[in-house]
Image (cartoon, rainbow, N blue to C red):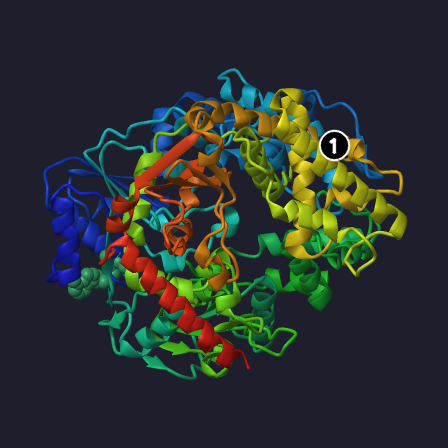
Amino acid sequence: MAMAPTKEQQAAREVFAAGRDLALVAGAGTGKTSTLILMGAATRKRGLYVAFNRAIADDARGRFGPNVECRTAHSLAFKAVGHHYRDRLDASARIPAKHTARLLGITRDLSVSSRLIKVTHQARLVMGMVRKFCYTTDRQVMARHMEPVNGLDGPGQEYLARTLLPYAHRAWEDICSLAGRLRFEHDHYMKLWAMTSPQLGADFVLLDEAQDTNPVLEEVFLSQDAQRICVGDPAQQIYGWRNARDVMTGFPAEQLRLTQSFRFGPAIAEVANRWLGHAGSEMQLTGHGPDSRVGKVTHPNAVLCRGNVDAMREVLAYLELGIPVALTGGGSALRRIATAAMELKAGTRTSHPELFLFSSWGEVQEYAEQDKAGQDLKAIVHLVDTYGPDQIIEAVDRLSSEEEAQVTVSTAHKAKGREWASVRIGEGFMAPSVDDDGLQRAMNVSEARLIYVAVSRARLQLDNEGITWIDEYETQEAGAGHNGAVAGRPMIELSLTGQLKYDSSPISQFMAAHLPYSQNLVRDYLTRIANLPHPVQPIDVQYPNWSALGHAIDYRLRLCLGGRLGPAVALGVMALDGSEALRGAPAPGTRHALHAAGRHLLATIDAYLADPSNQDETALSRLCFVAGSFEDIARTGEIRRFSMLAQATPATCLDDLTAAVPEYVVEDLDQQMRLAEGPFASFRALPAQARICGPVFTGSSDIGGADADYILGSLLLDCKATKDPRRLGREEIYQLAGYLLLDYTNQFGIDKVGLYLSRQGGLITWDTEEFLRRLGAAMPLAQLRDQLRRHLQEAARHGDHGGR
Ligand SMILES: Nc1ncnc2c1ncn2[C@@H]1O[C@H](COP(=O)(O)OP(=O)(O)OP(=O)(O)O)[C@@H](O)[C@H]1O
């Protein structure tokens, strides 16, 4: 590096040189590549720089020294695995869907929910399932890898996914085989490579753009024995919806920041910082680049918009003025949409992957108005209905290349990683709406990230035109009455888990002040789960009911410990008694039947607890799932549309409910219970009084409730049924800390806390002393408990006043 490295850059080099893993959070324009080069030059060891795309890798090759190899993940995968398939890659590029269907053995059109799904569409969906699978860390193709099919109802989607699953398995088998005949894609060998758990053969690995990493690459990176450095900007994570992962947050390593931006000066840095704050980042940038200006820009180099419709509007306006305009990514996707809309409007069908099920444009419009239609389809309809297919195609035809254009219009997503001298923020970024009580809703963090990305693309001039609403928003936000309350309720009245969702809640503030180093503990947790087996999960359902499965396994484990289900199930059953208003409740006859079935359920569970030899596993799993539906009533105050109870009739009895429990639920609970046999054996051997299920603490009533899952001997244990345990973090750790501290009087004598990961059979525990020490506690447990009690009582007094 010719210029003198900043202190922050030097600090990163030092951690690197000391051989430690590092997560380097690098704000926009802070010279992350320069810093990585600085690191590479600080050693003779052999390094590997993994770039986001080929252009970046090519550019980096000329900048790094000879000891650092610069590659994309795909090129690594190609070298290791993909080259075996080279012939197939070329030869199979254009296999028609009809031929794919034949190769897969799909021979008949399928009638699903009165829609006809042709063999060619089935073949496309199957190949789509395999593609989606290749973006995950799953070990086999599953029903939920099928993309939602526009135009099909829920049961239809489930049926279709289940029917196509065997073909998807066949497809993956074919793809894996060197002699296979189906289309072979780059993401296929990437997945095949990742499944070999490759070691990259370097002494250190530098992962770039780590905030938006393909999960498959994330898994490879995290399993490296080499020194691992990831660099990126979590506040710029904008591809979460495409499955991309932020490796940085929660990476078990030291974290450093680069905050001096060389892209722009202080004026633009100030705008960027404002959005960083709304994006939940504590980082603040300083502007060390060319002098910059924020204000009206008449002829910007780039206009950045929210979505495609907004970009189209800008494009049309420039065309009208006769100004040559480019659209990032070109116009081919827009042209395909417009052509499909034309076909449908003319009464013919289209093969467009998002529109193939519809027979007319009217049908598309109607479907797009329903809740379940995806945002993408809504945007397509909005675009076509606003401009008409002809005008869209005409505009696409008149687009210029970026080199020739005077202005480039882009969505903020496609502007990632780019920069322009002058930028105007265009249409489509909307201020958060107000709720039913007229209160300003909080800004969506992912929306704020997108705007941060957009404003930080500018070097010299930034025109904030499309986001001037932020002033008004901030004024509202700072206004009295909003802080300290959620939907008009003082935060102190929220439950422990509810409060942990808000940084400004009394519990969160206490944790931040007294147990500040949650990252320390999260890091330890992540290190300890690294070698657990892959989580078990349902294979053949498109939309498993994860939340209901989570409750059911909790109940199932409670029963195996000899514990009761807890009061919420009984409350749910009671809510069905009589005729008091209950949202979603059926007619009195059915309601009565459900109440009777609920009582029967409670009695059956009691009988089981009195004589545990008396029930088979499957029957218990079914009962636990049904119990969850009753508990849901207690929690939500209604019978929700998707509840199995919503299907009841006056003739429904408990047997009907248990028989209606989907097979996948039984299998899933069964798998989890088998995993629990080992870890739970010693808990089951404890005397009955030492196995407490659903403990409530003295302090629980100082907030809106807090009940843990189990106290087993002196271990406080919370069960997590997530299939993605790496995503657990601060909230779950503070939840454990919350229970521990709310036991003001040490009623339960807790001396260990832990998490049980039921899909992996993983038991992670800490001695309370070590737990608190890692969290940075400055005083002993008894004193912390005292402090918390005082803090909550104080907050309650304050909340009372604030609420009025
Ligand atoms: N210590 C420094 N002093 C002065 N300028 C620097 C320093 N470090 C980096 N820069 C400048 O910052 C600009 C961006 O640097 P670099 O190419 O390393 O960033 P990048 O990897 O493209 O990513 P980003 O700009 O997002 O950080 C370059 O013009 C570079 O010369």
Viewer-proximal residue among 375 and 622: 622
Please say whether residue 659 is visible from this viewpoint: yes
Q: Which residue is mark 1?
A: 658
Q: Residue at x 38, y 24 (%)?
A: 196
Please say whether residue 209 is visible from this viewpoint: no
Question: For this view, does 181 lie left or right of residue 420?
Answer: right
Q: Residue at x 70, y 20 (%)?
A: 105
* Identity, as a three-letter code, of the amino acid under mark 1: Thr
Give the answer, above or below, for where 314 lies relative to 162: below
| Crowd band around label 1 with a 10 angstrom C-alpha radius: few (<14), some (14–19), many (20+) | many
Q: Where the C terminus falls, by quadrant?
A: bottom right
Viewer-proximal residue among 216 and 309: 216
Question: For this view, does 298 lie left or right of residue 421?
Answer: right
Question: For this view, does 33 lie left or right of residue 471?
Answer: left
Which of the 4 quarters of the picture holds residue 457?
bottom left
Q: Quadrant of ligand 1?
A: bottom left
Which of the 4 quarters of the picture holds residue 288?
bottom left
Give the answer, above or below, for where 31 lies relative to 427: above
Q: Residue at x 70, y 45 (%)?
A: 630
Viewer-proximal residue among 793 and 68: 793
Tag 1's secondary structure? helix
Q: Where the N terminus falls, by quadrant?
A: bottom left
Q: Residue reaching furthest top?
A: 179
Instruction: Point out residue 91 in the picture as x, y percentages from the top left corner.
Output: 53, 26
Give the answer, above or below, for where 546 lies relative to 193: below
Instruction: Point out residue 395 in the picture as x, y percentages from the top left corner.
Output: 62, 64
Instruction: Point out residue 129 in the picture as x, y percentages from the top left corner.
Output: 60, 34
Question: For this view, does 269 lie left or right of residue 560?
Answer: left
Instruction: Point out residue 277 in the picture as x, y percentages from the top left corner.
Output: 38, 69
Q: Residue at x 73, y 47 (%)?
A: 573
Viewer-proximal residue among 616 and 665: 616
